Amino acid sequence: MGFNQVLLTSCYIITQIAFGQIYEFTSPLRIGTTINSSADESNPVISSDGNTLYFVRTFDIKNTGGIYDQDIWYCKKSKNGWGPSIPLKALNNKLNNAVIAETIEESDSTRKSLYLISSYGVERDMQKGITMASRTLTDTLWIIQKKLPIPNLNIDGKYVSYTISKDQHVVILSYEGSDSEGEEDLYYSLKGPDGWTEPEHLGAMVNTPGFEISPFLSPSNDTLYFSSNGFKGYGDADIFYSVRKGKWNNWSKPVNLGKSINTSFFDAYFSLTDNCAIWSSNREGKDLDIWTAWSIKPPELILNVNEIKHVSEFQGNDGKISVEVVSGVKPFKYQWSNGLTTSDINSLRKGDYKLQVTDSIGQKINRTFTIEEPEATEQHVVRFPNIQYEFNKWTFVNDSSINTYDSLRLVAKLLEDYPNLIIELISHTDSRGEESRNLILSENRAKACYIYLVNEFKIDPRRIIPIGKGEAEPARWYDPELQQMVLLSEEYIQNKKNNEAHFEFLHQINRRTEGKVLRLDFNPNTAPEAPKSYLEFQEMP
């Protein structure tokens, strides 16, 4: 196990954790001389009422089994701190003894239970396990009751430790099993309607070829603290924590509790009562002592909104949201509902944008921002998302980079969001080819959009008028070299012919489909039928 101070080990439960994640601790303080001595003190356990501290003392000549024995000691809290240490003689024998937890019994709130590690049966009963003792709240004498009936708890190695959950339905065990990764590994057993389950391995995320000992489970059953020499740390054994991700064999990557708690020596048996940490360490290179520190609340995660810019025109895409984290624990992770992971997002259309910010210790902020747009006006041109066609055809382009069907779905949503809207659906071509042919091609492309919207999205056909403009109305484009908007005329594009990719890109901008708000007064009860010719493609000359 890598150390010779402790023979058998155990851990315990706590009352409440103040913070979901550990951030920082105050400077450690050794608990007073009434507890710590020239012997080894370990396994500190706070009673359910907070007034008794149980611990293990090893290498004390006053122990029941002699100097190499491990006995349970305790002390009471007083106005001036912890009182004198007293051996719990009724529960100490010549074997190694330790308290795992003190709890209130589930079935009788007037009785307390002690979960113990040792054997209290006949002389031959040497099987390692968890023994229970109980007493009433007014009694002082603990009475041995029974072993916790965990089936097939076969402990091959010399060292064993446990923790039991606050609800007394989960036990985390540390021992060297037949399927251990290395030395002592962590296992779990659950209490169900049919009793306790057989121990199962906690998984390779928390278990290593080294040892994992002194487990401690938070009251919410989601955070596990333990000591290990198998992860990168500061010394002989460090204290880590890991967060459960659903199932009991699925845990997050363990996190070191840091230099305030861990040293270049042996550190273990950690717990947190409210925000008071207590653990054992031989941090000064001598015997094991019990130490304490206060956890410091991390800075609250606070988000400032620097700017919300709404869309400047109907169905435009120049909205913007800019945020800034002003408090929390760096680094910060941004996750927007549109997939972006930056603090600022631009080129936004009307809609709701959800943001989740997470800091390095798991604090989260969830916000929803709404980008608005001006109301529609008649004769307003609507820039649709990218709708593309195969060359010299009106069949849609759909590949890994362009999905015209998704773009048409957005057009359908526009019409669903504004049920009184009547639009012209206008298609254009580039300047190549005969002008009369391009006019028919553009009309067929507009009709292809019309037919898809009517058939696939059940848009009322009376609300869409397909129009073809051919090559007559070139688009405008921002030229970064001239730093101004230019008309993509045939003459302008021909000047870019020496760059084939750019030449084709400019032609594609002209091959566009856009909309125009024709009216805002659609009435399904009075509107005339749509011409049947909108459903018929013209033959190309």
Image (cartoon, rainbow, N blue to C red):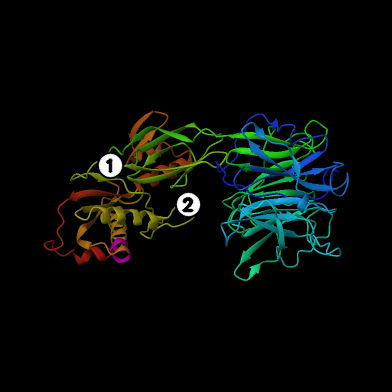
SS assignment at label 2: loop
Q: Which residue is found at the position 35% from the left and 59% from the top? A: 394
Q: Are marks 1 and 2 in contact (CB under 8 Å)?
A: no
What are the residue bounds of the magenta stretch?
A: 451-456
Which residue is depicted at the point 28% across and 37% down? 312
Element type at mark 1? loop
Q: Residues within 10 Å of mark 1 (few under 14, many from 20)?
A: many
Q: Is residue 452 magenta?
A: yes
Q: Nearer the viewer, residue 326 or 333?
A: 326
Image location of residue 214, percent across then percent down: 73, 48
Quarter containing the C terminus: bottom left
Residue with the mark numbered 2: 401
Front position among marks 1 and 2: 1
Left or right of 216, for residue 3:
right
Height in image: 288 above or below 160?
Answer: above
Is residue 342 within the magenta segment? no
Q: Earlier in the sequence, mark 1 or mark 2?
A: 1
Q: Please, what is the three-letter code of the amino acid marked with disc 2?
A: Ser
Which residue is farthest left? Answer: 526
* Left or right for 394, reference 44: left
Crowding near the residue tagged with mark 2, few <14, some 14–19, many ≥20 C-alpha atoms within 10 Å: few
Q: Position of residue 534 (x, y in %)?
A: 23, 63
**Residue 327 seen:** yes
Main secondary structure of the magenta stretch: helix
Disc 1 residue type?
Glu
- Which numbered tag is attached to residue 373? 1
Q: Position of residue 297 (x, y in %)?
A: 55, 34
